[in-house]
Image: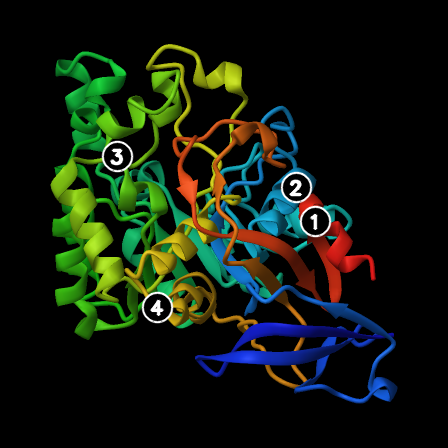
C-alpha cells in the first residue's frame, strides 16, 4: 500500500520545501518518493494536507520515565508511549529508576522484552548503575550502551572507591554515562538547617550542589576519556563549566523546557498546588532561567529533553517531604520548541536538531530523516493552530502540568512510525479519512 501525503511543506536537508508530496510505502515502512504531483499510478491512497501543515522528522526524547511494573498507578509503558506519539515523538529512552530498578543485565533484558508488546513508539532504555561495576560489560551484551548515574549512585561509587573503575570500564567499552549532577552530601546538610517547604526547594537542592558535582566529574575526565552527558542542567555556571571543558573529550549536556521557561514563583502562580512545581533539579531564579533560554536561542545547547516524570496526582498533593519530584512533559516539549520557532526565537532547523538529530548523535542511534529510502518516521504539524495546554486532555496518566494554560503556537496533527500512523489528533480525522 502506497500513501501519498500531498501538498504540505516538508523539511528536507535542513531546508523547507514550500510544497512537496511524499509517497510512503506502508508495507516497507519507508519513504518511497519525495516529489511534486506524481501520477496516479504511483500511489494507492491520497491524503491532501492543509496548506499550513508541515512534515518534520519524528522527534526523539532521550530522557523519559515510563514507570510501569510496581508503579502502574503513575504511568505505564503504553500510556507513556501514547503521550510520546501525541507529542510527535517516535523514539523514547526510558530511565532506569523503575521499581524494581534496571540495574542488572537480566532486568534490562526483561524490560526491553516487556516493552515490545506495549510501546507504540520505538523504545530504548538506559541502564542503572549496577551493584557490581563489572556488570557494565553485560549491559553491552544485552544491547545497552548507556548508564545513568543519580546523586545516590555517585555517592556510593565515591565512598566505595569504585568510581574510577566504573569510568575505566565505560571508557573501554564505549558506554555513555548520563549524569544527574547534584551533590547529595551538600543537599543533606542543607536539609538539616533549612525548613522543609516547597518554596525552599531550590535552597535545599541548591545551585552549588549541581555546580560542585559538575566540577567533580569534569576533573575526573582529565584522566579518563569517557563519553559523558550531563542531563537537565539548571544553572548558568554549570553550562559555562561544561562549555569550557569540551576540549577534554566527548562531553554534552541537555536542558528541559521547564528550566528554560519557568521559575518557582512563576510556576506556583500558574498552578493550583505547589507540589506540581517540585522537580529535581529545582526550578531556579530568573538569571539561570534566562541564561538557559538564551543558550538555546544562541545554539549553545545541543539537546532538549522532556524529563517526562509522571506521578499520581494524589502523590503531588502531599507535603514537601512526601511529594515526589517531577511532572509529565512528553505532550508539551515539541510544541514549546515549535512555539519558540513561531515567535522567531529559533529556526525550525534548530527545533529538529535539538529534539531529534542531536539526541540521536548523543546516544548513537540513527536519526529520523525525510529522505527517499529512509524509514517513514514523521510528525505532521499544523503551524496555524494555536492551543492552550489543558492537562485533562493528556494521554499520560498524569493529568497536570506546570505549563497549564500556556498558549502554544502549533499542534501535532499526526505521528507516523515506520510508515504507520500511531497518532492522529481527533480534530484532523476528516483530513486522513480520504
Tell me the quarter of the image containing the C terminus: bottom right
Report the Cα–Cα distance between label 4 and label 2.
Answer: 32 Å
- Label 4 and label 3: CA atoms lie apart by 26 Å
Figure quadrant of residue 37: bottom right
Q: Quadrant of residue 180?
A: top left
Mark pair 1, 2: CA separation? 6 Å
The answer for how far apart the CA atoms under marks 1 and 4 are is 31 Å
* Residue 102 in picture, x, y percent from top left: 55, 44
Q: Which residue is mark 1?
A: 119
**Residue 277 point in image, percent of width and height:** 34, 26
- Mark 1 burial class by Cα count in 10 Å: few <14, some 14-19, many 20+: some
Q: Which residue is mark 3?
A: 283
In the rendered image, the vertical position of residue 27 relative to residue 170, given as above or below? below
Mark 1 or mark 2: whose residue is earlier in sequence? 2
Instruction: Give the residue displayed 36% in from the left and 10% down from the top.
Output: 319
For marks 3 and 1, the one nearer the N-term is 1
**Eye-nearest disc, 4 or 3:** 4
Q: Give the image location of residue 360, x and y in percent.
A: 47, 68
Q: Residue at x 22, y 25 (%)?
A: 265
Q: Which residue is mark 4?
A: 347
Q: In the picture provided, is 78 more to the left or to the right than 244?
A: right
Rendered view: 39 above or below 26: below
The answer to whether residue 347 is seen in the rendering is yes
Q: Which residue is mark 2?
A: 77
Amino acid at each position: 500500500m502506497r500513501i501519498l501525503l500531498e501538498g504540505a511543506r516538508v523539511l528536507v536537508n535542513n531546508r523547507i520545501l514550500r510544497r512537496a508530496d511524499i509517497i510512503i510505502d506502508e508495507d516497507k515502512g519507508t519513504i518511497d518518493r519525495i516529489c511534486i504531483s506524481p501520477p496516479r499510478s504511483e500511489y494507492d491512497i491520497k491524503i491532501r494536507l492543509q496548506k499550513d501543515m508541515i512534515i518534520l522528522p519524528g522527534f526523539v526524547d532521550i530522557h523519559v520515565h515510563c514507570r510501569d511494573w510496581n508503579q502502574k498507578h503513575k504511568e505505564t509503558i503504553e500510556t507513556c508511549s501514547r503521550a510520546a506519539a501525541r507529542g510527535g515523538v517516535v523514539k523514547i529512552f526510558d530511565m532506569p529508576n523503575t521499581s524494581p530498578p534496571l540495574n542488572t543485565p537480566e532486568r534490562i533484558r526483561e524490560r526491553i522484552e516487556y516493552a515490545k508488546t506495549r510501546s507504540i513508539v520505538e523504545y530504548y532504555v538506559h541502564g542503572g548503575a549496577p551493584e557490581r561495576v563489572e556488570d557494565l560489560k553485560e549491559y553491552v551484551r544485552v544491547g545497552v550502551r548507556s548508564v545513568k548515574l543519580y546523586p545516590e549512585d555517585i555517592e556510593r561509587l565515591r565512598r566505595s572507591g569504585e568510581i574510577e573503575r566504573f569510568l575505566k570500564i565505560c571508557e573501554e567499552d564505549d558506554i555513555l554515562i548520563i549524569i544527574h549532577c547534584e551533590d547529595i552530601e551538600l543537599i543533606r546538610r542543607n536539609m538539616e538547617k533549612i525548613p522543609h517547604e516547597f518554596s525552599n526547594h531550590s535552597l535545599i537542592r541548591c545551585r552549588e550542589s549541581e555546580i560542585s558535582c559538575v566540577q567533580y566529574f569534569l576533573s575526573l575526565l582529565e584522566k579518563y576519556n569517557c563519553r559523558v552527558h550531563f542531563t537537565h542542567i539548571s544553572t548558568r555556571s554549570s553550562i559555562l563549566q561544561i562549555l569550557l571543558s569540551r576540549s577534554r573529550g566527548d562531553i554534552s549536556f541537555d536542558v528541559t523546557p521547564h528550566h528554560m521557561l519557568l521559575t518557582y514563583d512563576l510556576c506556583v502562580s500558574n498552578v493550583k498546588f505547589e507540589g506540581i512545581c517540585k522537580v529535581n533539579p529545582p526550578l531556579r531564579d530568573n538569571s539561570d532561567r534566562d541564561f538557559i533560554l538564551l543558550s538555546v536561542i544562541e545554539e549553545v545547547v545541543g539537546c532538549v529533553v522532556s524529563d517526562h516524570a509522571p506521578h499520581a496526582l494524589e502523590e503531588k498533593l502531599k507535603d514537601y517531604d512526601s511529594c515526589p519530584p517531577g511532572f509529565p512533559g512528553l505532550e508539551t516539549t515539541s510544541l514549546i520548541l515549535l512555539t519558540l520557532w513561531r515567535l522567531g526565537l529559533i529556526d525550525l532547523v534548530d527545533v529538529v536538531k535539538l529534539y531529534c538529530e542531536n539526541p540521536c548523535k548523543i546516544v548513537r542511534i540513527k536519526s529520523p530523516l525525510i529522505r527517499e529510502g529512509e524509514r517513514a518516521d514523521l510528525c505532521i504539524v499544523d503551524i496555524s493552530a494555536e492551543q492552550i495546554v489543558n492537562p485533562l486532555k493528556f494521554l499520560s496518566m498524569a493529568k497536570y502540568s506546570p505549563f497549564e494554560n500556556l498558549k502554544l503556537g502549533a499542534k501535532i496533527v499526526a505521528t507516523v512510525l515506520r510508515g504507520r500512523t500511531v497518532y492522529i489528533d481527533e480534530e484532523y480525522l476528516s483530513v486522513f479519512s480520504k
